[in-house]
Image: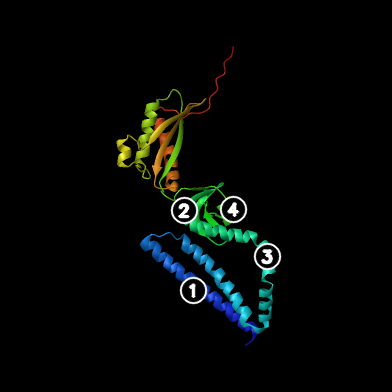
């Protein structure tokens, strides 16, 4: 058989096997997620690693099934020590990424679908490959972070245990506004929002915990700064809740003669 034909057949077989394995893993993964609500991270990593393993095997098959390349294979094994040293030196970063990906899958600081923040990058984990982790941010952009980098960073994971999110909403009012009325308006609007949830367990209620907690944050030169802590099911919903509350609070403040804090300067002429 022609050497090029043989190599082509082996590569074609490797591609077909790789595609079949990925299809089988995807099918199994979809069924598991739907029926058992399992974590897809391990399966996604296995899916991404399968192609690498298959083509590595195909390379060795090509070397030892083609007579013309057998001498090359023997030479490579004879010089395996030198080759390994050179390869290790040349692929330190690649190996660091692979090892980092394995550690992510084993120790699970985050999983596919989790909402995390790495440095200034924030988004949901879309995929974990042998080389990198892919985040999808709220602008629908993909942030590609090498596994070696993300493994060494501090990670804020907002969904690893509990997806509920407590949003802090700052609202300033002027010193001559009725602070009690302002707080009541914030509480009323917050509780009416469809994304608001009462986070309290029975023991929290018995201990007097508030479903929405409004605190005086500070006295500034422009007014009194209030901070409302309101819970939602997810971080994404909490952002929409904050935006809607800020809009509704301003309208309701205007109807009740409560002034939003703004910088003011008083000039006294003598």
Q: Residues within 10 Å of mark 4 (few under 14, many from 20)?
A: some
Query: Which residue occupies 66% across, 81% down?
Result: 70
For this rendering, which residue is in front, 215 or 256? 215
> Where's residue 75, x and y in %?
69, 76
Q: CA distance from mark 3 to mark 1?
A: 35 Å
Q: Earlier in the sequence, mark 4 or mark 2?
A: 2
Q: Quadrant of the C terminus?
A: top right
Q: Which residue is mark 3?
A: 85
Q: Earlier in the sequence, mark 4 or mark 3?
A: 3
Asked if the residue under mark 1 is in contact with the one under mark 3, i.e. CB atoms within 8 Å, the reply is: no
Q: Which residue is mark 2?
A: 114
Q: Which residue is mark 1?
A: 20
Badge 2 marks a residue whose secondary structure is loop
Q: Which residue is mark 4?
A: 149
Q: CA distance from mark 4 to mark 3?
A: 24 Å
Q: Earlier in the sequence, mark 1 or mark 2?
A: 1
Q: Residues within 10 Å of mark 2 (few under 14, many from 20)?
A: some
Q: Residues within 10 Å of mark 1 (few under 14, many from 20)?
A: few
Q: CA distance from mark 4 to mark 1?
A: 32 Å
């Amino acid at each position: 058989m022609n050497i090029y034909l043989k190599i082509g057949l082996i590569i074609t077989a490797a591609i077909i096997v790789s595609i079949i394995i990925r299809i089988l893993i995807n099918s199994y993964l979809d069924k598991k997620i739907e029926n058992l609500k399992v974590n897809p991270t391990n399966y996604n990593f296995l899916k991404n690693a399968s192609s690498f393993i298959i083509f590595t095997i195909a390379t060795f098959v090509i070397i030892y099934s083609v007579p013309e390349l057998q001498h090359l294979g023997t030479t490579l094994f004879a010089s395996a020590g030198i080759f390994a040293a050179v390869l290790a030196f040349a692929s330190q970063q690649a190996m660091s990424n692979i090892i980092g990906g394995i550690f992510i899958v084993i120790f699970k600081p985050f999983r596919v679908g989790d909402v995390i923040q790495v440095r200034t990058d924030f988004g949901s984990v879309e995929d974990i490959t042998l080389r990198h982790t892919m985040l999808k941010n709220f602008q629908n952009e993909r942030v590609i972070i090498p596994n070696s980098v993300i493994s060494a960073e501090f990670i804020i994971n907002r969904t690893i245990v509990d997806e509920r999110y407590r949003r802090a909403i700052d609202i300033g009012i002027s010193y001559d506004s009725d602070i009690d009325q302002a707080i009541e308006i914030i509480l009323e609007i917050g509780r009416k929002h469809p994304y608001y949830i009462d986070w309290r367990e029975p023991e929290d209620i018995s201990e007097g915990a508030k479903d929405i907690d409004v605190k005086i944050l500070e006295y500034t030169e422009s007014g009194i700064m209030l901070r409302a802590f309101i819970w939602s099911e997810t971080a994404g919903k909490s952002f929409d809740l904050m935006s809607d509350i800020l809009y509704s609070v301003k309208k309701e403040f205007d109807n009740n003669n409560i002034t939003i804090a703004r910088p003011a300067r008083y000039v006294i002429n003598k």
